[in-house]
Every structure is written in C-alpha cells, then in structure tokens.
Image (cartoon, helix red, strand yellow):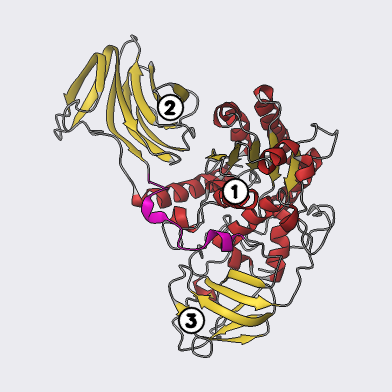
C-alpha cells in the first residue's frame, strides 16, 4: 500500500507543479526580509537573525504570540500554501487558514493539527495544496503559539494561487458548437485524433465515424489548418499524415512503456471536423429528468437554480486547455454543462460553484461535504469521484462515502438532487493491475445501484455512466485520443462528460439514437480495450 500512496502523492505533486508554473505569489514579505511588514503581530513576536548566514526570520515565543496576514483572493482559484516552521522545545503551535467571504465572515478553516500535512520534526515543512471554499474572498494565514515553553521560528511563508479565470483565458471556440452531442446529427466538431507513428511508419489516427467530407483538420489550439493531400490523406476512418506535413505527431518510441509511466499527450492531438452518415450504435445515457423533478421544474420555469460540482481533478478541470493555459482555453466540463443548460432552457439564473479538489478521494468528499457543498444550499449537485480512490478505497467504502455526502447535504437541504457521475477509464497502458481496473467498474456499478428507487433515497438521485461511455469510445478510437495523461481527459473527452451530463436533463440529447439505458460496465464481462 505504501508504494501506491507514493504514486498518488507523486501525481499530486506533478499536478501542483503544473499549476504553479504560472504562479502568482500572494503573501507579502513571507521571508521577513522587510521585518514584519505585511504581518499583524501580537504577543511575544520578534525578528531573529541567524549568526552563520545573516538570514532573518520571525520568532514567536517563549511567551504566547501570533502572526496574521489577510490576503484577497480571486474566486475559484486553487492555492498552494508553503512555509518552514522550526519548533524549539515546544509543540504548542498551530498554523491555520481561515477562509472569509466578501463581508469578512469565516466560512471555513483548516489547520496543521487536522487538515494540513506537516513534514519533519524540528524543522517542519508545509506544502499544502487545496481548493478554497467557493465563496472565499479573503484567506487569512495565522501562525500562533501558546504559552508553553520554547519558541517557534517562521520562514518562507508563501501562497501561490494561479488565476484560473484570467481574462486572457477566454474560450477560443464556439461553446454552443462544442456542446453538440457527438452521438446526434451528421456533423462532428473538433474530434481529437492523436497521430501516432509506429515502427517509423507514417503517423495515423482513427475517427469515430466514417467521414463523408472532411471540413477541417486543425492543430489542438485551432489556429493552424492542415490541407488534405498536402498534410494528410483519408483512408476510410483513418487519417494518414504525409511525410512532408508539419502536423503534430507522436512516435511510439517517445512514449514511456511499463507500469505507471506518465505520458502526457494533451495538446498533441489534431482536431477534426467532418460530416458523416453513420449512427452511434452503442448505449448512451438516457434522459433522467423524470427522476430530478425539482431541478427540471426550475429549469422549465426559468427559476433560480444553484448547481454545485463536487469531484476530483477531472471535475476541477485538470487536463483541459484552460487550466493548462493553452488554446483553445476550453472551460472545465461542469461549466460547459451549466452553459448548455442555460442555452437549452433559456435560463440565465443558474448559479454555479465548483467545489472540486484535485487529488481528492471520496473520503475527502465525505469529510468536507458540509463546508464545500451543503453551505451553498444547492438544488443540484454533480458528484464525480473515483479517479483517486481506486488505489486504496474498496468499492464498499467508496459507495458508503458517496451516500454519506448525499445524507450530509440533505440534512439541511432535503430537496437537493444529485447526478452521480462515475469516472472515465484510465488509459489501459498505464497499468496492467486488474484490481484497479475492476475497482473502477465496481464503483460505477454501485453508484448506479444507489439510484434505484427505494434502495437508498427517495427520487432525486440519478446516474451518468462515464465509465461505460469511455469504454465504448476507447473501443472506437485510441484511448490517447481522449486523454491529456493516463488519468485525465483532454478537451475532447471533457466534452463527452459535459454532453452526457446535459443529456440527463435534456430529452432531446438524452433521447439518442439508441433508446436503451446505459449498462453498468460490470453488468457484463469487461473487455479491456487495446492499448
């Protein structure tokens, strides 16, 4: 188990590193080079200088004292708190993050005794990534020591908060077009294809349908157009890259092989728009609005509707182009979902909050359901965990955590409704460990079971099977067409997430070509797609 805990920790470190590559340092004078400027000091607080190198740091003690700094933050941005704390002959200290709303009222707090991981003993390092409460306007950092003996030395306090909603990250694509269901109509817009060269042969990629006419083939950012005959040829459902083309390609020799190799291919796919005459012959999620009566009534009557997305990094938007700060800056899939609902139902009164936390498990979801969801008084909650659970959380524990979230939210909001969304399959090339593959399938099966009338809840809990949908799409294409990395979808499959969630609330897109319920991936024997 230790091995896989290390893997999960490493993935979270990579995620945080990706976010802070465009970091925005918020703390004023975190290294105390300007004395105590920017800090509010109380009690026994002074500066101390290291005799060996002349470095200055803050010292609290030997009496009680505290250092506090309040920081104005942007809305919806994840943060990483860092600090070096050296406690000398005392354990009587605590670092606390207070999350305050626009009126300065505390809406949530976390601290180093329960929530924030502290590494080391005498010299303790804090490097804590988290998603603030959605209503956060200010974050207040407080480092305090009680009256016990000893001192606490504080240095290098920082808080990085990249702006995930900056004005220059406006979508460079038509969101209404983006949200046209892949399974309806005869036009497919911007389908992702990874042009893969194997054994030195020309790079090829497969389309979902047989194209009747190619409208465009462009780079991932939608800025460069490639020309048929010059850059590529079409052979049935297959695109073949010409030797002289500047079209992006990936060679098989450049992909790492073996267990848990982290191949990032996001942004390397080409985007194909085309006409076809085929039909999608596989199961798709049906309209589930009959089981979400309160939500549907508000949508149809254009009443205010509060939607909360509660999930892991997939739902936060990691792997999509806006959070990657690359064109076309596609918003996280829950935002696409809300956008499309507003367009369909002409409802401009949908209030949306994304309470998702990258690296989070269903246990985290259970622990934070009151603060991150229930406090927002939602009408509809999208619950989407599982991609961090399969390493260590059993299917029974997983579904127990998910149902606990529902109970906690409904304790104060009895009319809240829920869409339970199972995770997409990870890239089959990532690991051959069938235990993890099977766990994801069991999660989907058990989430679906929760929605059966009279089993756990009264009506108002429905299911979207992204596990099953990903299996069908992987079988038709390459998994790497759909992925940013082994665990996260790229823009293309994020659109599958958004479109499938919309289908649950839209009888037009939910009444797809095949009018059958989605089969849980464990209702029948699961066949792993080819790598």
SS for tag 3?
strand
**What residue do we see at 54% from left, 71% from top?**
271
Element marked by disc 1 = helix
Give the total number of marks visible in the rendering.
3
Name the residue tied to disc 3. Answer: 226
Q: Which residue is mark 1?
A: 342
Q: Which mark is residue 471?
A: none
Residue plotted at (44% across, 82% down): 246
| Label 1 vs 2, first from the N-terminus | 2
Residues rendered magenta in the picture: 162-179
Q: CA distance from mark 1 to mark 2?
A: 27 Å
Label 3, label 2: how far apart the Cα atoms are: 49 Å
Residue annotated with mark 2: 101
Mark 3 and mark 2 lie on one chain; the one further toward the N terminus is 2
Q: Position of residue 135 (x, y in %)?
A: 47, 32
176 inside magenta stretch = yes
Does residue 296 show up?
A: yes
Which of 204 and 198 lies nearest the eye of the viewer?
204
Q: How crowded is the residue under tag 2: few (<14 C-alpha within 10 Å), some, or many (20+)?
A: some
């Amino acid at each position: 188990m230790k091995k896989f805990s290390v893997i999960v920790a490493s993935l979270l470190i990579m995620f945080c590193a990706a976010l802070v590559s465009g970091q925005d340092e918020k703390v004023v004078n975190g290294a105390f080079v300007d004395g105590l400027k920017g800090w509010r000091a109380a009690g026994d607080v002074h500066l101390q200088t290291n005799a060996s190198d002349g470095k200055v740091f803050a010292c609290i003690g030997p009496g009680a004292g505290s250092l506090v700094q309040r920081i104005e933050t942007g809305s919806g941005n994840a943060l990483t708190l860092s600090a070096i704390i050296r406690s000398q002959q005392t354990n009587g200290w605590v670092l606390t993050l207070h999350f305050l709303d626009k009126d300065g009222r505390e809406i949530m707090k976390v601290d180093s005794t329960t929530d924030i991981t502290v590494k080391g003993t005498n010299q303790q390092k804090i490097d804590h990534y988290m998603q603030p409460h959605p209503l956060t306007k200010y974050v207040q950092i407080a480092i305090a020591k009680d009256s016990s003996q000893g001192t606490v030395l504080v240095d290098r306090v920082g808080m990085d908060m990249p702006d995930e909603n900056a004005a220059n990250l406006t979508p460079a694509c038509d969101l209404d077009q983006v949200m046209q269901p892949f399974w309806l109509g005869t036009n497919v817009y911007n389908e992702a294809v990874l042009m893969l060269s194997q054994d030195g042969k020309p790079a090829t990629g497969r389309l979902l349908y047989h194209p009747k006419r190619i409208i465009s083939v462009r780079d991932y950012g939608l800025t460069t157009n490639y020309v048929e005959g010059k850059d590529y040829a079409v052979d049935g459902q297959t695109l073949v890259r010409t030797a002289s083309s500047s079209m992006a390609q990936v060679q098989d020799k450049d992909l790492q092989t073996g267990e848990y190799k982290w191949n990032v291919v996001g942004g390397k796919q080409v985007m194909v728009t085309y006409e076809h005459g085929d039909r999608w012959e596989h199961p798709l999620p049906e309209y589930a609005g009959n089981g979400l009566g309160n939500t549907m009534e508000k949508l149809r009557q254009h009443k205010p509707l509060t939607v909360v997305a509660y999930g892991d990094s997939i739902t936060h938007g990691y792997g999509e182009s806006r959070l990657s700060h690359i064109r076309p800056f596609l918003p996280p899939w829950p935002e696409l979902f809300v956008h499309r609902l507003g367009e369909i139902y002409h409802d401009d009164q949908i209030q949306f909050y994304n309470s998702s936390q990258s690296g989070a498990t269903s246990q985290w979801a259970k622990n934070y359901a009151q603060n991150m969801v229930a406090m927002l008084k939602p009408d509809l909650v999208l619950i989407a965990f599982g991609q961090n659970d399969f390493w260590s959380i059993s299917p029974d524990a997983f579904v127990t955590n998910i149902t606990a979230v529902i109970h906690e939210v409904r304790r104060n909001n009895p009319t809240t409704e829920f869409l339970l969304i199972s995770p997409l399959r990870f890239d089959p090339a990532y690991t051959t460990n069938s235990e993890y593959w099977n766990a994801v399938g069991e999660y989907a099966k058990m989430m679906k079971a929760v929605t059966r009338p009279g089993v756990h809840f009264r009506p108002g809990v429905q299911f979207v099977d992204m596990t099953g949908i990903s299996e069908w799409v992987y079988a038709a294409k390459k998994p790497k067409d759909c992925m940013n990395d082994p665990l996260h979808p790229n823009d293309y499959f994020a659109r599958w997430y958004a479109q499938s969630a919309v289908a649950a609330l839209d009888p037009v897109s939910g009444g797809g070509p095949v009018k059958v319920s989605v089969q849980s991936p464990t209702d029948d024997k699961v066949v792993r797609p080819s790598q």
